[in-house]
Amino acid sequence: MKIALMGTGYVGLVTGACLASLGNDVICVDIDDEKVSNLRKGVIPFFEPGLRDMVEMNLAQKRLMFTTDSELAIRNSDVIFIAVGTPSAPDGDGKADLSAVFAAAEHIARYMDSYKVIIVKSTVPVGTCHRLKEFIGQKQKKPVEFDVASNPEFLREGEAVNDFMIPDRVVVGADNGKVKDVMLSIYKPIERTGKPILVTDVKSSELIKYANNAMLATRISFMNELSHLCEKVGADIKTIARGIGLDGRIGPRFLQAGIGYGGSCFSKDVRALIHMLRESGCSSKLLEAVDAVNEAQKLSIIPKIRKLAPDLKGKRVTVWGLSFKPKTDDLRDAPSIVIINELQKLGAEVYAFDPVSERNARLVLGNVHFADTPLGALEGSHCLVIVTEWDLFRELDKNRMKLLMAEPVVIDGRNIYEPEEMRSLGFNYVGVGRG
């Protein structure tokens, strides 16, 4: 099938490369000349395991191309995916900014000259697909038949290629049989692996993505709120998580307490869903609490630092991990930004290490010293703060860690170490919700 992808951001690039790997001819469109030029050379603008190899393979086999020419892409495709960003609008009320979605739709209206199925991959509020259908119809120079479908993405950063090729499920929002047949044809190779394809009406499909992320965010905030009680009464949040996770009705995933979620999806999608609920006259109390708990959790580590290291003025503090989660270089809404800013306000000199995020971190963090290794960042430190649970931190030589530090103070924001072991080795150690 001939497919165009509008947008080569995280979702667009992964989707385009994976669709090409399924045997489709894919043209990815972006307005950024430099980005497109780099992509033609196989240079990926963000870190995602396995993606570069997939892009290079499909470029070499001529199933994947990159262009700034939207007319070329639209006219030479049967199916057009809109996969542009939908960040929170600048006014701060949580509403999704759909300007890029409608800009892409305007290009489609201008250049399409035959029947197209337009598939919205971007995360958009309920009713957007119907609005797009009206908008494109109004913007057409001459009437051309088309349909608009919803196909939300469920790609985890760091696992995106696997999530596309071996998904838990594929959700398709289609309002007629013709669109449904096209969508099922695209995903037939995935269906053959036994993964379910859920076909719904368009509005339900749009809402599934928001509900999905809001549920995961709720589980995280629930455990983070419970972690404070654990600290007061001497219980262990990791044991609590295991105990409730063994209940088949609950399951073990997304029950890890820490310093809050970040990234490009959870925060903005929770806030967008809050906005939709309010706009529709519905209560949003639960999700407002989920968002508030998460924002407070990012700062909850600061009192722990100050308790173990009361005077940080002029002291060296090491931060391990900057990205909002492992296996990505994404710092959007990352707890590290909030924590480092607070440490600097307290007068600390911050040394940081992250395996892949330094380039992005330099763009958003000022006056931070970046080290080439985790132990290099630790030398002479009065306090270590673990912010991102990269696997390489787990099995480092702890005796060497202690010898390198000026003071053996460890604040473990992701509970990657065991308190008893750390304290037995002489560390002044505290985790999250671990008594």
Image (cartoon, rainbow, N blue to C red):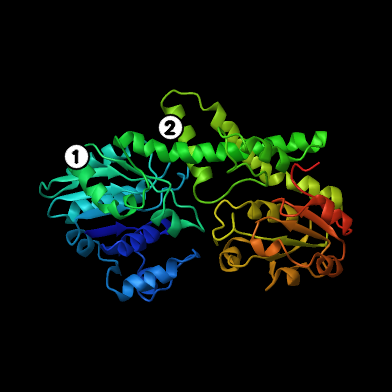
**Circle 2 residues within 10 Å: few <14, some 14–19, many ≥20:** some
Residue 312 visible from this viewpoint = no
* Kind of residue at disc 2: Met
Residue at 59% across, 55% down: 325
Q: Earlier in the sequence, mark 1 or mark 2?
A: 1
Where is residue 127 drawn, in percent x and y? 32, 35
Task: Say which element carries label 1.
Answer: helix
The residue carrying mark 2 is: 276
Task: Say which element carries label 2.
Answer: helix
Residue at 17% across, 46% down: 146
Measured along the vertical axis of the image, is residue 273 above or below residue 354? Answer: above
Measured along the vertical axis of the image, is residue 401 above or below residue 309? Answer: below
Residue at the extreme left: 142
Where is residue 302 drawn, in percent x and y? 76, 48
Quarter location, residue 58: bottom left
The residue carrying mark 1 is: 177
The answer to whether the residues at label 1 and label 2 have Cβ atoms under 8 Å apart is no
Front position among marks 1 and 2: 1
Where is residue 292 drawn, in percent x and y? 61, 36
Residue at 50% across, 43% down: 268
Measured along the vertical axis of the image, is residue 23 above or below residue 97? Answer: below
Label placed on residue 229: none
**Circle 1 residues within 10 Å: few <14, some 14–19, many ≥20:** few
Where is residue 149 drawn, in percent x and y? 27, 43
Residue 188 visible from this viewpoint = yes
Residue at 64% across, 65% down: 354
* Kind of residue at disc 1: Gly
